[in-house]
Amino acid sequence: MDRVNRTLCWSICAAFFLVAPQAWGIDPCVNAFAFVMPAHPGATDVITWWSPLGTRVTAPLVVKTTVGSDNQIALDIRAAYDPMATAGYEAMGPYPYMGHFGPLAAGQYAVRVSLSGGCDWPQAPLMVSAQPAPTATGPVVEFYNAALDQYFNTISIDQIHDLDAGIHSGWVRTGQSFSAYYPLQSDSRGLNVQRFYGKPEAGLNSHFLTWVLDEIGVLTYGSLSSDWIFEDGDTFEIPVPLTTTGACPAGTTPVFRLWNNRADTGHRYTSDKRTKDQMISAGYIAEGYGPDAVFMCALASPAP
């Protein structure tokens, strides 16, 4: 993220970090973080700002975005029960807390964040270019191990080669894949998906993919950290759905996460609705957001 749009990130962050209202159930000193997606927006992009406040917020939040003719952008954040939060406010939560604006014509903008009708913060610059920054995408290929009855997904060209070559025995392609960004190649159009490995001595021997900060925390330093090994902080990068509705951004398609509901915890990740239904019929449980339990959002372009 360049200096201009990083400044916008920290303006939004500071609004939560320093003056988050007690009435929202937020500790005034909560360490919240926010960033802008994509990092270098183009004139055709819908711009998302994202704040992972997680379970520390007990009240749902809403935001109203106003873009003035003078390139001034006002973000008014309120608790959903605020009587002033009427027409034009967009739901931001629960976790992760997102707001959207754009597309915007190429140019320099100034963004001001206010909380609950007060607590104005200094304007932060936002640069929108005529063309978006370059990205690189590829297929997240699915493999299956019949002896373990477990699935594995990877975008890594080296890992795909090794599995195809039988270096790790027992794994075969299922024929399924979905498109995502390569690590560090999304220009923040997608979130980092982290990978963990379940220890065999804990009765597991499976891999787990997640972008959800609460899950990452539990596996890294929480109650399940002794059973799981952190393997990769950026397995691939991918857009995620609105957690209020499960809706994916325009130009993307749902990816479903299905849990095998067994002691040797395992998951399958698929963008195929029929596969999702088949796995549920076989006893798997869908894990995701909204009525369709969407967990990630694959790029609509077919995987090569």
Image: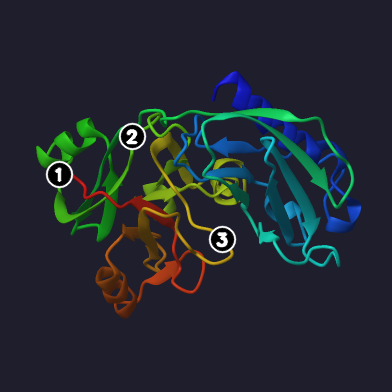
Q: Position of residue 93 (x, y in %)?
A: 66, 59
The residue tagged 2 is 182
Q: Is residue 212 left or right of residue 206?
A: right
Which of the two discs, 3 and 2, labels the residue nearer the N terminus?
2
Color scheme of the displayed model:
rainbow
Q: Quadrant of the N terminus?
A: top right
Q: Mark 1 or mark 2, which is nearer to you? A: 2
Give the structural element (helix, strand or loop) at label 1.
loop
Which of the two discs, 1 and 2, labels the residue nearer the N terminus?
1
Q: Position of residue 205 (x, y in %)?
A: 34, 50
Residue contact between numbered discs 1 and 3, judged by CB atoms under 8 Å: no
The residue tagged 3 is 243
Give the structural element (helix, strand or loop) at label 2.
loop
- For the view shown, which residue lies furthest in the top direction? 3
Residue contact between numbered discs 1 and 2, judged by CB atoms under 8 Å: no
The residue tagged 1 is 169
Q: Position of residue 9 (x, y in %)?
A: 66, 32
The CA distance from mark 3 to mark 2 is: 24 Å
- The residue type indicated by label 3 comes to Thr
Which disc is residue 61 wearing?
none
Q: Nearer the viewer, residue 108 or 242?
A: 108
Give the structural element (helix, strand or loop) at label 3.
loop
Residue pictured at 67% horizontal, 52% vertical: 54
Q: Nearer the viewer, residue 240 or 99?
A: 99
- The residue type indicated by label 2 comes to Tyr
